[in-house]
Image (cartoon, grey):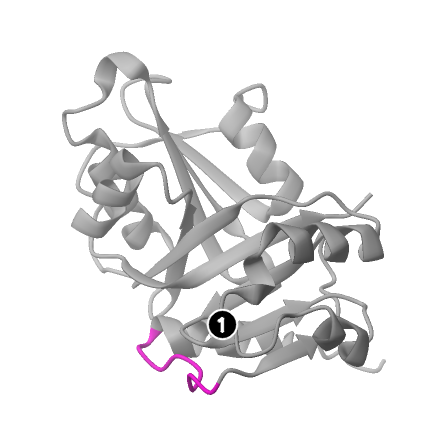
Amino acid sequence: MATLLLVAHPLLDVLLEAARGRAPAPDGRVDVLPALAGPVDAIVTFTARAFIVADVDPDLVRSRLRPNDPGAPTLPAFVTWLADQVGGRAGQVDVVLAAPALEGPAPLPLDDRDDMTHHHRVARAGRYRTHLRVVTNEGDGAVLVIGRGLAGRWEAAFEVAPERRGRGAGRALALAARHLVPPEQHVFVQVSPGNAASLRAVLAAGYRPIGSEVLIPRG
């Protein structure tokens, strides 16, 4: 019987290299990559470099971008146009941060949960990620979700109940994610630029900003 070889999407190499401190050259280029196998198209940007990941004509894409403007791929008019081209819904611009896996136990006690599909953080993760693992700390007050997301990278998302915020729980969950991914891997998080509390938490947990992205769910 023939062996099926799974070929990684080229975006994954770009993301992993950026996570290792080797971001794409800031040469102003906009590359159009093939659509992902998952449920979203995407705009991924780094310093003066962008990747449009969708089934669209590269020349048409570049004709819609303002020349010599590194921010053009994330301008609302372009994002809305691209979403219309692929039949999707434009998402928000998120900061993307990444950190390498850590050995040893997580910094707080965690319980694996398979009964939280109702939780909005878990439900949203299930729309965008596979291989989900859901853990909590002290009940449902602190929830961490890890799974395979954009281009197959490891992604983490967390939620802290209002009554537990301001006491380091978010930082501890973000740090715990680094202990729960396989060795020698990187874990990525996406944070809205206005969510200062989450940004502070993931920065304190050792994550580094590498770029930004807009996800465009299909259908």
Q: Which residue is mark 1?
A: 70
- Residue at image coords 50%, 82%: 28
Residue 112 place in picture, x, y as percent: 41, 32
In reply to whether residue 156 is colored magenta, the answer given is: no
Image quadrant where residue 188 sits: bottom left
- What kind of secondary structure does the magenta stretch mostly adopt? loop
**213 lies left or right of 191:** right
Q: Residues within 10 Å of mark 1 (few under 14, many from 20)?
A: many
Residue 13 visible at all? yes
Tell me: residue 202, above or below residue 111: below
**58 lies left or right of 182:** right
List the single residue furthest toward the front. Answer: 67
- Residue at image coords 40%, 51%: 189
In-front residue for pair 113/198: 198
Tell me: residue 129, above or below residue 136: below
Image quadrant where residue 81 sits: bottom right
Residue stretch in magenta:
20-27
Tell me: residue 212, above or below residue 19: above
In reply to whether residue 25 is colored magenta, the answer given is: yes
Assign the N terminus to one quadrant of the image.
bottom right
In-front residue for pair 2/80: 80
Q: Type of residue at label 1? A: Pro
Residue 168 place in picture, x, y as percent: 16, 32
